[in-house]
Image (cartoon, rainbow, N blue to C red):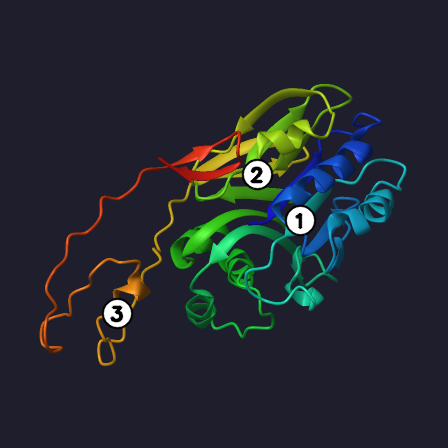
Amino acid sequence: MCGIGGYYRVGYHTPKSTAAGVRALWLALMDRGTHAAGLAVLDSDSGTPAILKAGAPASHIAKMATGAAFDGSQPPRWVMLHTRHATSGSAANNMNNHPLGTDLSGPAAVCLIHNGVITNKAAVLKALNVDASRGVDSEAALACVRAGGVEKVAELCAGSMALAWNVGAAVHLWTDGSNPLALGCLKSGGGGWLWASTRRHLEATGLKFGQIFDADKNREYILTPEGLRRGRLYPKKQRASITADWATFDGGLSRFGGVDICRPAGTGRVKRRRKIPRARRQYWDSNLGGWVYD
């Protein structure tokens, strides 16, 4: 579980408290990860993004990083925030920490943040003919958005995903529904948008919102200097699956959570079927900020 968040400026001005609110958002997101933290910022539409990150909690770098991000004569065009709970790729290697960036010295620069776990990174990179350069699974999503945007993510990636990434001055947001994502529009001060893992994190900023809503499952949202645009739905095509080595399978059900799996025809003795336990219903609890079972 990781925390994602950010700010997008619409127009020329935003409330004076925006910088403090963004810092408060980043600190609030630490309840979703403290192994590492990072910030990406784009000062102007014609500029290139900068990334500051470290294998440490957001509290160690938030004051310095947000101060630098909002140091200009006007607020930056956008800021991306991430707090990491590492599942693959050591946080001691800063290449694995978010935001992930590529081509940062030119107009094709991309920064990406991800909450979730991608379970088929090797297959994705192979399909795109891309060599792995990091240990983190999110590298698969970065390769996909470079190759074909969220459509390529939905086509190739299996696992769980809430994503934010930039295409120039625009920021794109998408969740497959397995990880939460909320957006809020500032009420005054020239306008602007913030996004975060949950509504609770947005409310922790102390900023005044005209509206806050949860992102639709599979829908792409695009933030531009003109405002928010609701894009198309991109349902995920890949599904995570359990594979078994039938040549060495010894019938040990503990490997599969107590559910008996019968051998395919022609692979040897078929084990007697056992009763499969009733599936438990899963739902999102907004108060707990996580998936729970009945």
The 10 Å Cα crowd at callout 2, few under 14, some 14 to 19, many 20 or more, is: some
Label 1 to label 3, Cα distance in Å?
40 Å
Q: Which one is earlier in the sequence, the residue at label 1 or at label 3?
A: 1
- Residue position for label 3: 252
Q: Circle 2 sits on which residue? A: 222
Horizontal side, residue 225 vs residue 2: left or right: right
What residue appears at the point 76 percent right and 23 percent down from the top-left corner?
190
Location of residue 108 in the rendering, given as x and y in whole percent from the top left corner: 66, 58
Task: Please say if the residues under marks 3 and 2 sit with CB atoms less than 8 Å apart.
Answer: no
Tag 2: residue type?
Ile
Q: Which residue is mark 1?
A: 82
Farthest residue, direction bottom: 247
Residue 237 seen: yes
Residue 244 drawn above or below residue 175: below
Helix, strand or loop at mark 3: loop
Q: Amino acid at mark 1?
A: His
